Amino acid sequence: MKRFNKYITRTGVSILSLLLLLGCNNFDEINTNPDDTTTVSASLLATNVILRYTRFSGRDAKVMIGDNALPKYVGYANEGQMDQQYNKIGGGDFGPMTILPNIEKMIEYAEGGIMEDSYKGLGAFAKAYTFYRLTMKMGDIPYSDAGQGAQGIYKVKYDPQEQVLKGVLDELRAADQYFANGTTFQGDPTPYNGNPVKWRKAVNSFALKVLMSVSDKESIGGINVSSRFAEIVSAGNLMDASTGFYGLAYSSQNRHPLSGTNDLFTSRTILSSLMIDNLKLLNDRRMYYFAEPAGALIADGYGASDPAAYRGVDVEIAYAQMNAGHSANLYSLINKRYLQEEASEPLRLITFAEQELILAEAVLKGWISGDAKTYYESGVKAALTDVMTQANGNAAHGMPITQEYIDAYFTGEAAFKTTLDDQLKQIWMQRYILQFMQDPKSSYFEYRRNEYPEFPVNPETSLNENNKNGIPMRWLYPASEASHNRENLEEALNRQYDGYDEINKIMWILK
């Protein structure tokens, strides 16, 4: 028996050794789970790239509230003063530039495939969007040398803002052509689902937004601003009512940042009087979607559907005074749906509504022909329709937006004015309302351009140390640059800001 066992053991070892010798070249294959992804594809990288610059980039709900506090949409009554509410902002972040290697790899993996042009279009747009936002926040930034770490360039130079914006416009033009030649691509988490026709329209709509945001400049790096704008419009590849928005839908997998945060912080977010008063002036039912009625006014006998039940706060009053007013239920809080719903209305970054309002302004500036009133009404109707179809009407306090309401909107203060100054202010106000809990930094950028709507400033409460009577004009450069890239940082500061990194310094586009 022992002899037999020894034979089996020796035979087993021999067979095992033979299998190992014969199969060693396939060992990795044998031990690979066929259900796992073992290689990175262009589509996987596309998803990563899109999410990197599209989804809400903050860490938590407080960041979103802070973003909305800077352009005076909200105040808050807990945890002490919020810097942004009282005109203080800090350092920017070059982190978004880390998207560049993924863009490069995505295009590399798509080379020779039928989707190559679409991925190239996505890459060009992603770069344009990323660098536009960065330069609008800080001014001169690394651009031409950015993302060149693999080539040994670790201390990158800062490009002048004019050259960065020229690069942005060039990238957007390239993206337009790539998508014109493209086919449906995979890995797109937006509502466009890889449709190159819709992507192309969104790209061109965004190009109009970029050009309008620098409307005080006649040219950008040799590109005539108004002529490029008119050229894009005349080509005709713009968003229409059926294009849908560019952005992301919220869901149980991608929850709204305020969802489930009904705590002492988010539940004490107060709408500003700037926002509430203008919505009331326009008889705009978006107020009921954005806000809760003030508790004290409900106690006084006003109904939740009565505009008199809504009161905003002057976000520049002393924090202790605002906090006391909140405790007395004097103010309208943010609508509870934001705190309770996983999927309130989606994040809309590029919309037909904003495009139409931009076109209305372009007509008034003489950049394009057309009827400014028609564009204005088209944009506002689209904005109202978005809320009607994408937000929870059951949370609108008995005042839902309906088609009948939209059709009758343009009366009183909402009717298109007769003077140029009033018309421009109407357009700017509608763009301001459009970005509530959406893309508030865009409203801040627009305020710097137009100084409208007028943001409240109180020198007694302002945290803007060097300009108590003013709104900050920019973010600081990342603190890490002073230790890791000092020479290039100092060169950029000397070129733009008299050698001093400070939030009130005026960047090139505002000079």
Image (spheres, rainbow, N blue to C red):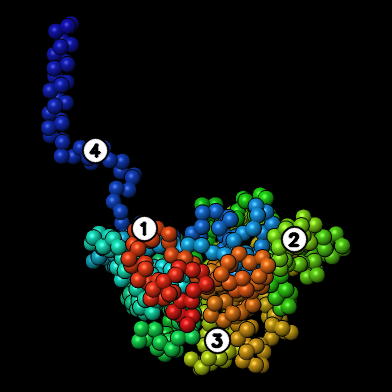
Identify the secondary structure beneath mark 1: helix
Q: Residue at x 57, y 76 (%)?
A: 447
Determine which residue is flagged by label 3.
Answer: 361
Picture disc at residue 30: 4
Amino acid type at circle 1 is: Ser
Using the image, determine if residue 358 lies above or below residue 476: below
Q: Residue at x 69, y 57 (%)?
A: 77
State how far apart marks 2 and 4 are (Cα). Answer: 70 Å
Q: Earlier in the sequence, mark 2 or mark 1?
A: 2
Q: Nearer the viewer, mark 4 or mark 1?
A: 1
Identify the secondary structure beneath mark 2: helix
For residue 69, say whether it is visible.
Answer: no
Front in this rendered view, residue 218 or 294: 218
Q: Nearer the viewer, mark 3 or mark 4?
A: 3
Of all residues, the one furthest to the top in this rendering is: 1
Q: Earlier in the sequence, mark 2 or mark 4?
A: 4
State how far apart marks 3 and 1 are (Cα). Answer: 44 Å
Horizontal and vertical percent position of residue 114: 28, 67
Horizontal and vertical percent position of residue 191: 48, 65
Identify the secondary structure beneath mark 3: helix
Determine which residue is flagged by label 1.
Answer: 483
Using the image, determine if residue 327 lies above or below residue 35: below
